[in-house]
Image: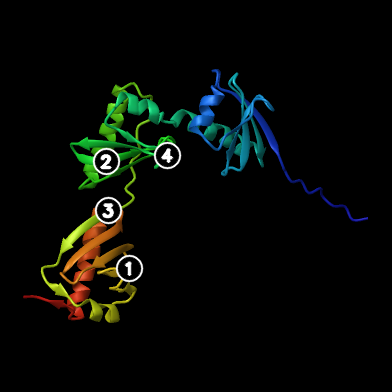
Amino acid sequence: MTQTRPVIAIVNVVASATINQRLDLVDITKKFPAVEYHPEQFPGAVFRLKSPKTATLLFGSGKMVCTGAKSQELAETAVKKVVELLRKRLDLVDITKKFPAVEYHPEQFPGAVFRLKSPKTATLLFGSGKMVCTGAKSQELAETAVKKVVELLRKGKIKIKSEPIVTIQNIVSSINLGGKVSLEQAARTLPRSMYEPEQFPGLIHRMLDPKTVILIFSSGKLVCVGAKLEKDVHRSVNQIHSLLEEKNLMVYD
């Protein structure tokens, strides 16, 4: 008889934890609409995560029970992630009370808009703790704006424990080449380009390196989007300018 080894597969790790403070489950369900809480059926709220795929039961006592993890490590990761999410929530209603100029219309948009005059920007605040800053004219000004918003929130006694981590997602730039561009000819000549004047007056050119999208208008004006670094904007513009001149697509007065 051939001896075989048992095949073991972990299908569920149940872990318990406590955060040593009471949890307001009603308030949690308001801030996390996806959390399930039916106190008439069960005393705990269910906080589900997609990654790692788990369900964590939250109790008013501060106790937590994580189920569904495939390993001890994933169970610990899930509990820490839930705690981190609970801590990072921003109370947008409270922010609007302390900062009346902040715009918040949850029935229309889930974020609140915090506008600064200097640097002139609009920062979107979300209950998850995420922030999106728009309108800055440089990466430095975007970082300055985010830090200033966080500083103002803290002065208004809004709890923000960690320092903001700023990641540039998109730089939008406008350019004037100083000459006109034949868009119909450019559409036939430039690869990865689309030109449908009945829908949009500009030619859309997709660049591979750096990965950006450049809108080209017959007036010679360009709009570059998608760059994450300012140097990539300059690289993109220089490349498309050289290509337009090389293909004799530029007309100068």
For badge 4, the amino acid type reads: Glu
Q: Amino acid at mark 3?
A: Ile
Residue under circle 4? 107
Query: Which of the two labelled residues, at mark 3 and mark 1, occupies the earlier sequence position?
Result: 3
Q: Which residue is drawn at the image coordinates 31% and 31% (left, top)?
A: 150
Q: Residue at x 35, y 32 (%)?
A: 163
Q: Residue at x 31, y 27 (%)?
A: 153
Where does the image place residue 15, in percent across and percent down from the top left? 66, 30
Residue at the image position 54 percent from the left and 22 percent from the top: 24
Q: Is residue 206 above or below residue 163?
A: below
Marks 3 & 2, CB-CB < 8 Å contact: no
Is 4 on the left-hand or right-hand side of 55?
Answer: right
Q: Which labelled disc corresponds to residue 65?
A: none
Which mark is first along the chain, 2 or 3?
2
Label 1 and label 4: CA atoms lie apart by 36 Å
Q: Dot 2 corresponds to which residue?
A: 122
Q: Which residue is mark 1?
A: 206
Residue 237 is drawn in which quadrant?
bottom left
Drawn side of residue 62 relative to residue 130, left or right: right
Whether 3 is drawn above or below 191: the answer is above
Q: Nearer the viewer, mark 2 or mark 1?
A: 2
**Residue assigned mark 3:** 171
Separation of residues labelled 3 and 4 (CA atoms): 29 Å
Nearest the eye: 238 or 219: 219
Specify the quadrant that holds the N terminus: bottom right
Q: Position of residue 133 (x, y in %)?
A: 30, 42
